[in-house]
Image: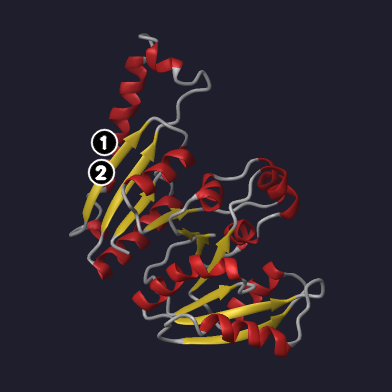
């Protein structure tokens, strides 16, 4: 976790994320790429070619540079190598592109969450990044003065397609000396006997070298509630999930447990794209 990308819109939630990123960077002798996207007006890229718009764009960019420079002077960032990035682009697209361009190991983002109609029709940049980023995304909801990942919950069905992203999970938990709690959520609509569920997890885990790991089977009415209730029962520090990155109608009808957790969980959530 040496190369950490942190998007900021200068909100308090973005600063919560930056403070966590700073803690991770200091523990791992890492660096931070602090990025702000200046989204163009609805007229699109044409505004860049209209001479009367250029002074306004320069004004906004200079204002952002000044705010980033001020932010980088914060005490909690002292001693960390920080690269500031300012670009004219849609926020979530720019974040994803920069995560890959700078070979980021982790993206840390703040989110206030959402629910109901706002969640359905608006969606957040954080949600879009979670859905599409190939880089793991850590979502922070509140101030974490002493961020740790001592109790790390990873919920899954432990199918074959999870194995590739799970390599990054193992890398993360071993790096943070986490106790990894693997949990299979049993629901009425997708019930497995304890014997079958345990066998699936045991065979899955056998293929990886995990320093500290236990397996659990937890019954609940649906997967999201099961993850949240289980995480609370063990006082988890962080929740991990894999995300499919589905788009279009498939995503609309099937939904995404990872995105629901990003919206509803108060604990930090980290996602790994399949």
- In this picture, residue 25 sits left or right of residue 194: left
Quarter-wise, where is residue 248 in the image? Answer: top right
Residue on which disc 2 sits? 70
Secondary element type, mark 1: helix
Under circle 2, the secondary element is helix
Mark seen at residue 48: none
> Residue 96: x and y, percent?
44, 45
* Residue extending farthest right: 188
Q: Residue at coordinates 37% horizontally, 9% vertically from top-left?
A: 52
Circle 1 residues within 10 Å: few <14, some 14–19, many ≥20: few
Q: In the image as oriented, which residue stretches furthest toward the left?
A: 79
Which residue is nearer to you in this view: 23 or 253? 253
Q: Are marks 1 and 2 in contact (CB under 8 Å)?
A: yes
Q: Quadrant of the C terminus?
A: bottom right
Q: Mark 1 = which residue?
A: 66
Residue pushed farthest bottom? 195
* Picture residue at 21% right of the left edge, 58% below the top: 80
Expressed as whole percent of the image width and height from the top left, the position of residue 207 reads 49, 81
Residue 54 is left or right of residue 165, and the answer is left
């Amino acid at each position: 976790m040496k190369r950490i990308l942190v998007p900021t819109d200068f909100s308090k939630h973005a600063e919560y994320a930056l403070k966590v990123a700073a803690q991770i960077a200091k523990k791992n002798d890492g660096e931070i790429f602090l990025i702000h996207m200046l989204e163009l007006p609805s007229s699109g890229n044409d505004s860049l070619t209209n001479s009367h718009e250029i002074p306004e764009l320069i004004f906004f960019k200079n204002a952002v540079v000044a705010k980033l420079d001020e932010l980088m002077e914060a005490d909690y960032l002292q001693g960390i190598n920080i690269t500031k990035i300012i670009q004219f682009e849609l926020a979530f697209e720019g974040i994803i592109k920069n995560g890959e361009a700078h070979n980021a190991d982790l993206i840390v983002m703040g989110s206030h969450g959402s629910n109901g109609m706002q969640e359905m029709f608006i969606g957040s940049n954080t949600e879009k990044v979670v859905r599409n980023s190939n880089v793991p995304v850590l979502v922070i909801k509140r101030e974490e003065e002493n961020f740790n990942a001592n109790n790390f919950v990873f919920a899954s069905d432990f199918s074959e397609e999870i194995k590739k992203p799970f390599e990054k999970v193992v890398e993360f938990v071993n790096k943070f000396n986490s106790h990894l709690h693997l949990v299979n959520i049993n629901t009425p609509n997708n019930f497995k006997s304890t014997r079958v569920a345990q066998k699936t997890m045991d065979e899955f885990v056998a293929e990886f070298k995990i320093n500290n790991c236990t397996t659990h089977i937890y019954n609940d009415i649906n997967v999201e509630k099961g993850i949240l209730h289980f995480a609370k029962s063990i006082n988890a520090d962080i929740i991990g999930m894999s995300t499919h990155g589905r788009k279009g109608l498939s995503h609309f009808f099937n939904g995404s447990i990872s995105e629901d957790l990003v919206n509803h969980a108060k604990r930090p959530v980290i996602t790994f794209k399949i």
